[in-house]
Every structure is written in structure tokens, then in C-alpha cells.
Image (spheres, grey):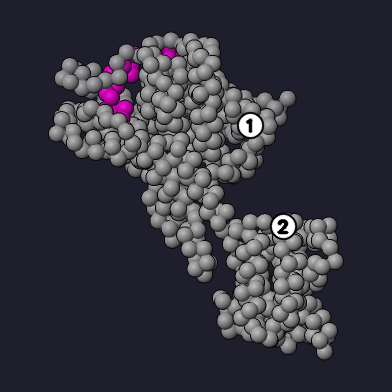
Amino acid sequence: MPKLIAPSFSAYTAGWVRSDLVAGLTVWAVLVPESLAYATIAGVTPVVGLYAAVPALLLYALLGSSRHLIVAPMSATAALSAGVVAAVGTGHGQAAVLTAGLAVATGIVALLAGLLRLGFLAAFISEPVLKGFIIGLALTIMVGQVPALLGVGKGSGDFFEKAWDVLRHLGDADGLTVLVGLASLTALLVLRRWLPLLPGSLVVALACIGLTAGLDLDQHGLDIVGHIGAGLPRLGFPDVSFDQFRDLLGGAVGVMLVGFAEGLGAAKTYAARSGYEIDANRELIGLGGANLGAGLASGMVVNGSLSKTAVNGSAGARSQLSGVTAAVLTVLTLLFLTGLFENLPEATLAAIVIAAVIELVDLASLRQLWRVRAGQLAKVYQLSARADFVGAVAAMLGVLVFDTLPGLVIGIGVSLLLLIDRTSRPHLAPLAPVGGIELAQTGHPAGPWVDTTRNPEYAEVPGVLVLRVEAALVFANADYVRERVRAFADADDDLRLVILDGRTTPSIDVTATGMLIQLRADLRRRGAELVLAEDVGQVRDVLERAADSAEPAIYRTVEAAIAASFTENG
């Protein structure tokens, strides 16, 4: 059973124990304050974050394929959870129950996806879309924490409405809260910059707890976390109705996709560094088990954390024993140390959240995506030449204006539309031989054939049009390709041969096969012949089965097609 259960412990040696225990202690120091903070993002009491962390760490260690990934509450899925739960309904006392119910629903969806081997679903969220989504989410989270940082009332609505509400109430900010909040945020950023190995969140949290208790700051108007019930959570299925659980399932799909994509990226990053493989389907099962356990323990949604995984890896973790160690220490925190965190200022908790997500506002990546365009192809594709940038910005604005889950759907939708646009209008490149016209006419290898729009110094073969279709030939682009080939042909009155170079056409479907037969007839009416060269085997197979005697001839090389034409025409 070693491949089915706890794969990270296979080939475990006693020499790993010390480094795993140290890494687990380091992860715990970061996990406790951040889990408390992320629970507030989800709209539940801080201790819910600790409830979720324990079963998530233990179950992922048993089911997941990564030796380094830390699965716990995270900002992105916490914000998604808040949105989904608010849409279902948050009556008196319902937020915590629905939050746990969403974790169970997410776990079930992820487990089913893993068992059905749907790990490829992560490919439907492109990296630029995920980047834009995370930036929008980080900005939304930050603006939601600013009121607690400044001691003003919390507004509602989208990002812009919340930001405007904060600006309108700046005059109402509480001086002591502002001092504690900004000092906490500054300390966190300074520690991250100059002492990255130090658990800054825990250090700042303990320092502020000590100051609050020593100076009775809560008696001077500073809001604190307040009572945190000690002990372990209630175990069992959340008290949600069938209708509520059904409504939660829809949101659970989005939560699962985001959590899976983020966790899979972190897992692959550290697996590549350590030389082992990640199984995407096992990751779905691990994510499912972790969420199911978190929900049954009155917790919240969880997913793989890049930041805590980075802490784990840098501390020397060799297996999931580090995660198990962090889980045991979190249990001890729930049993004996919750009282310590009751004096944690709300402003410090907000600062911890803001410091955790501020690095996710990666505007430099958006600038890079804007610069990445397809050169000459930008003239052809126009807006879709910057498809990655457009998808990222669409996801970001979708989150800022319409909320988290709609923003993700908008980003994915825009990316797919731009992909369809590019697929339906592939680039057709006219080619010329580098080795010279004479060699090409004799049938001898004439060197590479290059795009004349990029290399105008090379001459095309007179009377011959060689075109490279830089895409698969499918129903979506068949008519466009036919029109473009005819347009090229109409520009040459002496044309007698059109060759489609198939080296960049990996596949063809039945619709495109019919198009080639029709195109051959079109060209014959104007005195030219259509042939194929350098075909891929898959294309030849489809043509043999789907076409009839009217399909274009296929030659092994472009030069062979030209030589045959010159021989036939004297």
C-alpha cells in the first residue's frame, strides 16, 4: 500500500527526522497567526482557521503526492468561501455552519474529480488568468482589511465601493488603532525583507499581545480578538439543509478549481527542486480529503499554500512529517494556548492579512504580459495577440467589480474566447527556399523554407505558392484558411501550383478535409493545382479515410512537389 497511502514517507530514513521536526515547528509558527487571520476573511471566528488546519495537514499527508506542500486555510479560497456563503445565506449563526458545509462540498467535489482522473481540469485556468484573479482577489482582501487596520466601520459592495467608503470615513479613524495597525504592518514588512527566516507573523502577533496586555490597550479603545474557545472542535457533518448543501455545491466547484490550481503550482515547484514527480489526480484526492476533514471538524476550506510551502522547504523538510508535526503543535495550541491569542489586536490581525497578500499584487507581471505579443502576428490577431494580458485583466476586473467567483469565470471565459479567435484565424506564411530557386526546382533539398514576410531577401519560386498553415486544420478555421489561400492565389496571375507545407499542421478533421477538396477545385478553375507536402502521419490517415479521389496529392517534401509539377509541365 505504500503507493496508495502516505507516499511521501516511502524510503523514509531516520536522518530526515530532525529536519522534518524543525520544519514542522517553523511552519506552525507561521500557520497559527495566519490561520486566525484567514478565518476572519472567510467571515467566521478566528479559531475556525485552526480547526481546519489540523485535519487538513494530517489527511493531505496520507493522501497527497507532495513531500513539501502545506495544506491549510489560504486567503484566496477564504475570500471565495465568504462570497459563496454570503450568496447562500448568512442568517443568525449560519456563517460558521455554511462555511464548514462548503468545505465538505469542496472535499466531495475534489475527491470525485480525483477518482475520475480529472486532473487535467487545471489546464482550463491559464497562468495569466490565475495571476489576474489573484491580483484582484488580493486587492479585494486588502481593502476589506483596511477598516480594521484604521478602526473605522466596514463598508459593503465591490472593491471600488469599499475603497470609497474607507476614503469617506478616514476622518473617523481611531488614533490608537492606526498606530498599532501601521506599526504591525511596517514590522511585518521589515522582518520579511531583512529577516525572512524569522516567523514574522508570530513575532509581531506575540509582541502586540504583550503590549496590549501590559498596557491595557483594550481599555483605551483598541479592539482585540476576544474570547477564543479552548479545546477541540465538534466533529460531524455540518448542520446544513439539503437545499443549502445543494446550493453550496455550485460554489464548491469554483473553490476547488482555484485551490487545486494554486496548490498544484506550489507542489510542482518544490517537486522539481527535489527531483520527484507530482500526480495531479492524487493532488485532487489529497485536496478533497483535506477539505472533507476540515469541514467535518467545523473548519473552513483549505488548499495548498505557496508561502507556507516555501517556509517548509527552506526549513529543510524532507517529507510530510513536517506537516504532521505542525498539526500536532496546532492541537496543543487549541488545547492550551488559545487564551494567549485573545489579546491579539484586530488591527494586528488585519496587518498580518495585508502583509500576507500584498506580495500577490504583482503588477510587474501584468506589464510583462502586455509586452508579450506575437510580433508580426499582432497585425493579424490584433487584440488576441495580447490574449494573456487581456485574460489576466478581465479576471482582475471581474473580481474587483463582480466578486470572486464571477471574476474567475469571466477570466476563463475571455481566455477561451481569445483562444477560439486565434484558432479560427491561423497565420498563413508564404515561404521561400534559403538554398535558392534552382535547387528547389530540381527536387534537391533546398535548405529550410522561411517566411518571406520576415525574410524578404529570399525569393519565392516563380509560379509556385508555398504556404505554411501554423495551426491544426479544423472546422473552426477551415473557411478562413480557404479564403486566405484564394487571396494569395489571386495576387499571382502566373500561378500554377499551390503547396501547403504540413510541418506546422499536426492534425485535420473531416470539415477541413472537405475544405481542401473544395479549395483544390477552386484553384483548378483558375489554372493552378493544390498539393500537400511534409505532411504529418495523422493528417495523411484522416485524408485517406475521410476523402475520396478528389483529395490533393501528398508529396514527401516541398521540393518533390515542385519537381513533379515542373516535370509534368515540361
Q: Which residue extends farthest right?
A: 549
Residue at x 45%, y 38% (from the top left corner):
406
Label 2 sits on a secondary structure element that is: helix
Q: Indicate whether residue 349 is drawn in magenta.
A: yes
Amino acid bearing label 1: Ala
Q: Distance between the residues labelled 2 and 1?
A: 33 Å
Chief SS of the magenta region: helix
Vertical order, 116 against 49 (above or below): below
Amino acid bearing label 2: Thr
- State the mark number for residue 113: 1
Q: Position of residue 375 (x, y in %)?
A: 50, 67
- State the mark number for residue 564: none
Relative to residue 166, is residue 107 drawn left or right?
Answer: right
Task: Identify the residue position indicated by label 2 in the image.
Answer: 511
Bounds of the magenta segment: 332-350
Q: Depth-wise, is mark 2 or mark 1 nearer the camera?
A: 2
Label 1 sits on a secondary structure element that is: helix
